[in-house]
Amino acid sequence: MSQSVRIPSLAPAARTPRRLRLSMGREDWIMAGGILAVGAFLVVAVALPLLALFVKAFENRAGEFVGLANFAAYFSTPSLTQSIWNSLFVASASTVITVTLGFVFAYGLTRTCMPLRGVLKAMAITPILSPSMLPAISLVYLFGNKGFAKGLLFGNSIYGPIGIIMGEVYYTFPHVLLILVTALSMADARLYEAADALGTSRWRTFWTVTLPGVRYGLVSAAVVAFTLALTDFGVAKVVGGRFNVLATDVYKQVIGQKNFPMGAVVGLVLLMPALLSFLVTRHVQKRQKAQLSARSVLLAPQPQKGRDLVFFALCSVIALAIATMLGTSAFASFIKLWPYDLTLSLSNYDFSLVDSSGWTSYTNSLVMASSVAVIGTAVVFGGAYLVEKGRSLPLLRHAIGVLALLPLAVPGLVLGIAYIFFFNHPANPLGFLMGTMAILVINTLAHYYTVAHLSASTILKQVDGEYEAVSASLKVPFWRTFVLVTVPVCLPTILDIFVYLFATALTTASSLIFLYTPDTKTASVAVISIDDAGNIASAAAMAMVIVYTSAAVRGIDLLVRRFGLARFQRWRRR
């Protein structure tokens, strides 16, 4: 009798672990498949094209291996090697100026009580909405041969290092500012109280407390500014003149001379400083220590009329300079003929008169940017989730985490030319993608993958792993937990990734310059081609269309965050 009771009670207990193991096994296989898919994308979109670029640098035009002959030819050509020093010079000068101005502006925003801080900050980050060609176009109108402010250059020409440096300062300033604002916001008020108690002068406190506290932020900002200025193509293309830099050399070798092996060599040379900057940034991040402990007190600036007015004046001048650059292109896009006929007109927005693509290039940009934003957000966030929360293939997940950081060190021009060598190879079954909108989407997503991945990984690390543990114990599939818990919790960051990918895809041109066709030309590329044709007013108009669209997307994002997210959270609570 006792056996008849025990047998039915033990049988389910013996079968349950088996069903559980089968269920978990299926989930592990699905996770492994997703991890492999993300890894395959990064390998095809980043690693293999860079490998093809490396191989091409050691071949001649016929595809035969020639060893270091291409490098010997490059370094024995004075006009090409001079571009290295030119690039390093303008990048270094731009970095010094940008970091100095950015530090002043960030200090005013975070360490003073100057008025209109929100307005000034909004004005300071507007360059992030525009393509890099826009400041160069504005400089032509301001300081060009017919510019109304060319006298301020004291006889010097805007077409050369002066123009490039000024354009790069405008282009890199918002990136530097955002880093320094974050660095300066993290300050322990107790250190400043101790300095005051010891009678330390403000100047000495600045050198012994403030600067050491933000040194890692300064290094990171300098590296970002240097890398962006070194690898940017748009400014140098418009106002570089005869002052050659590496970015324009790549374009001339590939597009102008069809010398692909030499283009690959220049691409590798351009990659080296960017890669070195990336390694410096990684080293700095590893050494950086927390600025705030559990006992720290955040520094709250106290009003000081004199100091506040000084920083308000300095920040206002910087913001006014930025607004002048943006306003110049906006004004020029609405007048008939600069500087002879200043009558307002919309004729410059009739792009069919100056470019065969007309408004189609803008439509292409919307399609491309939307595709990058939608597909990229899903791929990046899903991939980051599998890397951070996955249980399968730990070595592969670590490798994907490392590979996801690689695009940050690869300039857009280098990635673009690498795509030519990889996808145009006769043995590549993916060659059918060349000339399609798909290749532009893949290239742009790969180019900006790192920042989006870091954003997703950061927020996912903050989500308690207990959610997945509890779901597993209750036999809830991980994808259900992902949809019902992880996505709603991380929705603000997901929106950040979406807007970031859309805006960068809309404004980028450097990597797409090698990959577009007449049917897939984007608005940012059209700005360059229209300017090359001598229609600078229409180029300004196309650049401003990009700015208007980027601003509209940012505005919609703010509305969604203010009203949509709040309603969504209330709905979830019900």
Image (cartoon, rainbow, N blue to C red):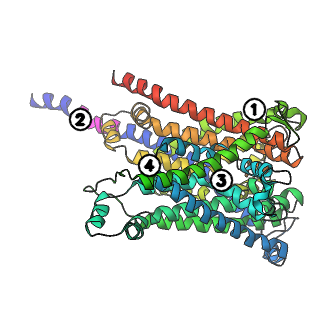
Q: Quadrant of the N terminus?
A: top left
- Sequence order check: which comes first, mark 1 or mark 3? 3
- Of circles 1 and 3, the one toward us is 3
Amino acid of disc 4? Thr
- Of circles 4 and 3, the one toward us is 3
Residue underneath mark 4: 458
- Sequence order check: which comes first, mark 2 or mark 3? 2
- Sequence order check: which comes first, mark 1 or mark 2? 2
Residue underneath mark 1: 363
* The disc label shown at residue 170, or none: 3
Seen from the viewer's position, the closer of residues 253 and 362 is 362
Q: Image point 36% across, 33% down: which residue?
A: 476
- Sequence order check: which comes first, mark 4 or mark 3? 3
Seen from the viewer's position, the closer of residues 560 and 551 is 551
Amino acid of disc 2? Ala
Main SS class of the magenta portion in the image: helix
Say which element carries label 3: helix
State which region is magenta: 11-20
Q: In the image, is residue 372 above or below residue 424?
A: above
The answer to whether residue 34 of the structure is visible from this angle is no
* The disc label shown at residue 13, or none: 2
Q: Are marks 1 and 2 in contact (CB under 8 Å)?
A: no
Quadrant in the rendering for residue 347: top right
